[in-house]
Amino acid sequence: MEKNPILLSTLSMDSDIPLYSQLVSIVKRNISAGTLATGDLLPSEAELCKTFDISRSTVRQAIGALESEGLVVRKQGRGTFVAEPKVRRKTEMVYSFTSEISSMGMTPSSTLIEFEVIEPTPDIVKVLELSGTDSKVYRFVRIRHVDGEPLILETSFYPQYIYPKLTKELLQTHSFYSLLYEVGVIPANAVDSYEAVIMSRKEAEMLGCKTGSCGFFVQRRTYTEGGMVYEFTQSLMRADRVKLDVFLHKDGVSFTRSVDKN
C-alpha cells in the first residue's frame, strides 16, 4: 500500500512554530498540491504520533484546527477525511485567528494577559443568553501577534459549562477552539460589528502604537449549528495594519480582512 503523503514530511523540533501548527501546514500543502484529494483518508492519530514523535493532544489540536477551517471532516469509527469543497466554503467565514493569519503566509502567536472565572454582568448574561444558576463565565485577555508584532487586544467570554476544566496553563498551550472541538462545540456562524475608535494610552502601549492612534473595535458573537451562543469577543485592532475590503454582489455583501506586513 502506498504511504500517505503526509507521513513523508517532517516536523522541526527547533522551530518557534508550534508542532500542531506545523502539522496543519503539512496537511494544507498536500491538499493544495492535490496529493490529497477530496475523500482521502488522513493517517490515524497513532500513525501521526509515531511518525512525528508527538503527543495525541498535539495531533488532536491540529485536526481540530483543520476541521474548524472545513478542510477535513471526522467520521465516527472511520477516521478523518479531506472534506468536499462545498463543506470548506460553508465554514471558511467562521473566524480562527491562527488559520486566518497562517493563510496570509504570516506567523500567528498569542500572549495571555488575564485569565479568570467570573460572575457575569447583566450585559454578558444577555449577550451569551445565559440562564439558571450555573452561569459562571471564563474571561481572558490576550494580545494577538503577527510575525512577533502586536496586532489585536482581545477580550473573550465563554460560558464555563461548555468546557468546565479549562485552566490558564491549558489555554497557554492549546488552541481553545481545538479543545472545544474535542467536546463537540463547533462554530457554525458568527456576527461581527465594527466601530472606528481612538485608542487610549494604555491600549496604544499594549499594541505598540502612539497614543491617540486609530483602531477597529470589533464585537463578535459565535454560534453553534444548533443556535447556541458560546463565544463573545471584544477585539481592538490596529487600524494601521488591518485593511477591510467590502464586496457588493447580487447575493449580498461580503468582506475580507488583510494584514499589512511591516
Image (cartoon, rainbow, N blue to C red):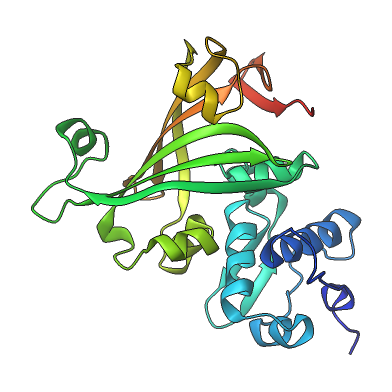
Quadrant the N terminus occupies: bottom right
Going by the image, does 183 lie left or right of 9?
Answer: left
Going by the image, does 3 lie left or right of 215?
Answer: right
Q: Which of 131/14 is in front? A: 14
Going by the image, does 230 lie left or right of 142?
Answer: left
Q: Which of 84/114 is in front? A: 114
Please give the name of the residue rendered at 68% of the width and 82% of the height, measured from the top-left corner.
Answer: 44
Seen in the picture, residue 135 relative to 232 is either above or below; the reply is below
Numbered-mark total: 0
Residue 190, quarter of the rendered image: top left
Going by the image, does 87 lie left or right of 219?
Answer: right
How far across and down, in percent of the image, does residue 92 sit? Answer: 63, 42
Residue 101, quarter of the rendered image: top right
Q: Which of 22/86 is in front? A: 22
Seen in the picture, residue 46 relative to 89 is either above or below; the reply is below
How far across and down, in percent of the image, does residue 200 sit? Answer: 44, 16
Please give the name of the residue rendered at 82% of the width and 59% of the height, measured from the top-left corner.
Answer: 31
Seen in the picture, residue 90 relative to 174 is either above or below; the reply is above
Quadrant the C terminus occupies: top right
Residue 61, quarter of the rendered image: bottom right
Please give the name of the residue rendered at 78% of the width and 57% of the height, measured from the top-left corner.
Answer: 28
How far across and down, in percent of the image, does residue 83 sit? Answer: 68, 59
Seen in the picture, residue 42 relative to 137 is either above or below; the reply is below
How far across and down, in percent of the image, does residue 12 sit? Answer: 82, 69
Please give the name of the residue rendered at 36% of the width and 64% of the height, measured from the top-left corner.
Answer: 166
